[in-house]
Image (spheres, grey):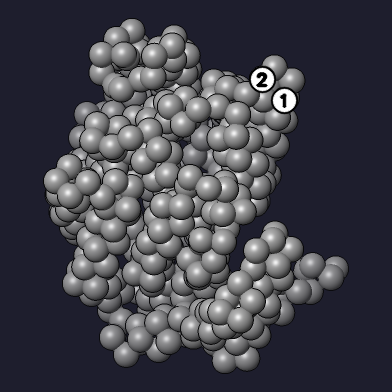
């Protein structure tokens, strides 16, 4: 919520004070740095998973062996990444479309982003202690403090020094490095076995991690094709306004995805332990419940965002950004297909079935990229074409492959999926959307107060429907415990 609030303020503040060309530089560089995981995922993909498994099986000495086997490979990858990034920064105006006069700013921003990411990767094994000990509340508190520091720095720079996209990167890098130092220190206190010893380096362990990571790398590439290539295509075939409009819609989509991911992430070590201990029935129940919860969270935000996208964009950005409403609505529609399989990526990781998931994800991303090139380069559909291609490709992939894959991995039936996930997961959104659409037809909101009241009215219907018709006995016990904890 902190991040979303500040992003809303930051985008509105910058777009009112800098040109679309300057803002597009930030959007393009963020899309470019999103490819950074490809340098490392072949080495990092299985680190946390196998360390958690070692502890679940009572083999703490194995943790030091895993760390010692992967750290030299990470160091080599980080060095190569730094070299490539710094060379690209030196010739950035030749590699990317950069607005005249923005070359030095873009170069500095890219250098900061490259150095920041390289340091994160080389220290990654030393941050796994939170996962092993499942100290996610503590980890989340540190992340909140990181974001608070970033927000303070960002507001100070933008208001105190002046509006510039450079300060967005500077604030993020400083806050990230402070968080990294604290989290590494604390993680090593939680799990002292996470340490490097040259004598424990083992090629067999390294090959096992790299083999696992090859498929996660394919998944990372697919994710980059989905989230970032669109910006680069628009940078080549569209306008700065296209890049800005698409970035706004994609950011809203990624923020909702991030919320669901943060909420679900503590389940990864639990799912890994369930699989290691062959508790398949519990694994299936957890996965189906996660899909239902994913739908509830995503559609609670996505439905009003799609229904009131035109009103929101008009109030937020004014005239000149009307296409952003269409892009936002299309992005929100993607959650209808992704929500039911919210835990599937983690399930594939936990069961070491990453090939089954990431190969198909890559294939669907190639389809999305092909449609994007056709709609943007040939049909001139701009940001709307990129968003529409993602909706089409994601919908087909989920319906034809990923939904059935989840059932195969868990052993659940289609009847279980329909009743436990789709019916209960969609019903609150259907009821609340009726309220939101009706208000939009009778009294279209034209002020922030009217828009807020309309959203709240539908949200009340959403929560009431969920509580009355969609919670099972386990859900109600969870809610009861939450309420008791809040009330003390």
280 to the left or right of 485:
left
* Vertical side of 120 occupied by 187: above or below: below
Crowd class of label 1 (few under 14; some 14 to 19; many from 20; radius 10 Å)? few
**What SS does tag 1 mark?**
helix
474 to the left or right of 124:
right
Residue at which label 1 appears: 159
Identify the residue shown where x is 43% and y is 27%. 21
* Residue 112 appearing in the image: yes
Question: Disc 1 versus disc 2: distance between alpha carbons?
Answer: 6 Å
Give the label on residue 209, or none.
none
Q: How many labels does the image show?
A: 2
389 to the left or right of 366:
right
* Residue 285 appearing in the image: no
Identify the residue shown where x is 43% and y is 72%. 291
Identify the residue shown where x is 40% and y is 58%. 326
Of residues 187 and 470, the one drawn nearer to the viewer in this rendering: 470
Callout 1 touching callout 2 (CB < 8 Å): no
Residue 352 screen position, x and y as percent: 27, 55
- Picture quarter containing residue 142? top right
300 to the left or right of 481:
left
Residue 7 screen position, x and y as percent: 59, 42
Residue 315 screen position, x and y as percent: 62, 54
**What SS does tag 2 mark?**
loop
- Picture quarter containing residue 99? top left
Residue at which label 2 appears: 162
Of residues 164 and 286, the one drawn nearer to the viewer in this rendering: 164
* Vertical side of 67 occupied by 119: above or below: above
């Amino acid at each position: 919520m902190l991040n979303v609030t500040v992003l809303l303020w930051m985008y509105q503040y910058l777009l009112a004070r800098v040109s679309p060309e300057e803002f597009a530089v930030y959007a393009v560089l963020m899309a470019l740095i999103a490819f950074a995981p490809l340098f490392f995922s072949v080495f990092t993909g299985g680190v946390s998973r196998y360390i958690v498994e070692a502890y679940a099986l009572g083999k703490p000495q194995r943790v030091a062996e895993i760390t010692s086997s992967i750290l030299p490979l990470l160091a080599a990858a980080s060095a190569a990444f730094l070299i490539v990034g710094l060379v690209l920064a030196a010739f950035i105006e030749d590699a990317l479309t950069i607005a005249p006069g923005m070359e030095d700013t873009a170069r500095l921003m890219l250098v900061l982003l490259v150095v920041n990411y390289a340091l994160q990767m080389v220290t990654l094994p030393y941050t796994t202690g939170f996962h092993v000990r499942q100290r996610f509340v503590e980890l989340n508190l540190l992340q909140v403090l990181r974001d608070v520091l970033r927000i303070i720095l960002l507001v100070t720079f933008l208001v105190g020094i002046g509006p510039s996209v450079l300060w967005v990167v500077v604030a993020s890098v400083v806050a990230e490095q402070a968080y990294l130092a604290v989290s590494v220190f604390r993680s090593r206190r939680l799990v002292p076995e996470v340490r490097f010893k040259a004598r424990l380096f083992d090629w067999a362990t390294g090959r096992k991690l790299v083999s696992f990571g090859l498929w996660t790398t394919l998944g990372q590439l697919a994710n980059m094709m989905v989230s970032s290539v669109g910006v680069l295509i628009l940078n080549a075939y569209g306008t700065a306004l296209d890049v800005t409009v698409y970035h706004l819609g994609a950011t809203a989509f990624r923020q909702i995805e991030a919320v669901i991911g943060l909420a679900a992430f503590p389940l990864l070590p639990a799912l890994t332990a369930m699989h290691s201990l062959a508790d398949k029935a519990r694994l299936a129940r957890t996965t189906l419940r996660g899909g239902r919860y994913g739908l509830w969270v995503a559609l609670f935000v996505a439905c009003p965002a799609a229904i009131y996208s035109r009103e929101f964009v008009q109030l937020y950005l004014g005239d000149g950004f009307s296409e952003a409403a269409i892009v936002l609505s299309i992005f929100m529609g993607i959650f209808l297909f992704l929500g039911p399989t919210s835990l599937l990526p983690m399930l594939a990781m936990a069961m070491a079935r990453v090939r089954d998931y990431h190969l198909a994800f890559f294939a669907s991303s190639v389809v999305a990229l092909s449609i994007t090139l056709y709609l943007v380069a040939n049909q001139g559909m701009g940001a709307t074409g990129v968003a529409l291609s993602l909706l089409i490709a994601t919908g087909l992939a989920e319906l034809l492959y990923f939904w059935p894959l989840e059932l195969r991995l868990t052993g659940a039936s289609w009847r279980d999926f329909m009743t436990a996930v789709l019916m209960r997961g969609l019903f609150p959104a259907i009821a609340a959307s009726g309220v939101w659409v009706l208000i939009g037809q009778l009294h279209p909101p034209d002020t922030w107060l009217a828009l807020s009241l309309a959203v709240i009215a539908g949200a009340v219907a959403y929560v009431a429907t969920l509580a009355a018709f969609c919670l099972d006995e386990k859900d109600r016990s969870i809610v009861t415990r939450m309420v008791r904890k809040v009330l003390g």
